[in-house]
Amino acid sequence: MNEIAMIEANGLEFGYLSAGPDSGPLALLLHGFPDTPHSWRHVAKELGAAGYRVVAPYMRGYAPTSVAPDGAYRAGALAADANALHEAFGGGADAVLVGHDWGAPAVYGAIAAEPSRWRRAVAMSMPPTAALRAGSLSYEQLKRSFYIYLFQTPVAESVLNADFIAGLWRDWSPGHDEDLRPVFDALRAPENVAAALGYYRSMLNPPARRPGRPAAQPLTASTVPVLYLHGAADGCLSFDAVDPALTNHLPPGSRHALIAEAGHFLQVDQPAAVNAEILDWFTAG
């Protein structure tokens, strides 16, 4: 991918990496936690070779992208960022959207709010909330999710350091030390650490609903079909916690696939398999 460039969208300055021809359909790739656009390098190479204009932004709060001045890190803000980036890059109705981990809720929100911007979408490693079964509250899954609850506490800012980030990667997708340095750089400053924690703190402590605020559009009403991918060896969220009838919670025409021998960061664990699924999905529609 090319060197980091900057663009303004939704009131923030976004850093981003890019690949492929400027004249191709927009392919927007959204990373999760604790991650950066660096982990999209395999996907970006294949999509760029297929003629897409690939853009992989640093998500809000991840340096060099701005922190949110209003502290907004909920999925609705991430979705608004995705649609604003589509506008900023001059995307058309042939644009495609890919999101991993926290990037997945951004995908769901973006295609629900403004489906006319996107032709097809891919979500990875985080299903819609409605698709999480009782298994998500099992003892085994709660052990995996310990960090979510730790991040609600006053010690979280001290805990979220390079050693902790490396530990999460070892538990979730071992063997990818080359992906850690970019994450350390993106979350080095205290304000960026606070931003990354803000995603989780807003998840369990949502703001009060504002009177007169329109309700979010249901994902299943979107016209944008979604390919959902999950690693069979995901150390963060076991697929056992996901509803087998996952497509019932996605727009019509969606499907899902389990990637063998892949952990949470399946795009770097099994790039050939993930790239094949994504390219087949985008070619078919």
Image (cartoon, rainbow, N blue to C red):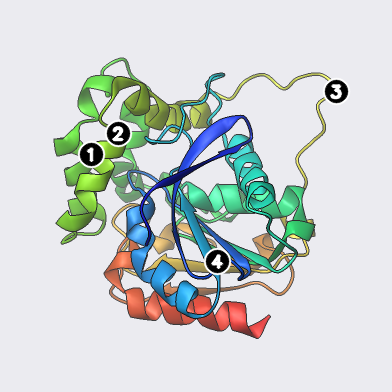
Label 4 sits on residue: 53
Q: Give the residue displayed 38% in from the left and 28% down from the top.
A: 197
- In the structure shown, which secondary structural element does the residue marked by tag 2 occupy? loop
Q: Give the residue displayed 37% in from the left and 44% down from the top.
A: 33
Local packing at callout 2 (Cα closer than 10 Å; few below 14, some 14-19, many 20+) is: many
Amino acid at circle 1: Phe
Of marks 2 and 3, the one in the foreground:
2
Q: Is residue 175 left or right of residue 128?
A: left
Residue 157, quarter of picture? top left
Label 2 sits on residue: 187
Q: Is residue 188 left or right of residue 27?
A: left
Percent x, y of residue 90? 68, 55
Alpha-carbon distance for marks 3 and 1? 41 Å
As drawn, the residue found furthest toward the right would be: 212
Amino acid at circle 4: Arg
- Mark closer to the chain start, 3 or 1: 1
Local packing at callout 4 (Cα closer than 10 Å; few below 14, some 14-19, many 20+) is: many
Amino acid at circle 3: Gly
Mark 1 and mark 2 in contact? Answer it, CB < 8 Å: yes
Of residue 171 and residue 50, the one placed in the foreground of this image is 50
Percent x, y of residue 92? 73, 62
Amino acid at circle 2: Leu
Label 1 sits on residue: 184
Image quadrant occupied by the N terminus: bottom left
Q: Is residue 186 left or right of residue 101?
A: left
Vertical arrangement, residue 216 with respect to residue 231, above or below? above
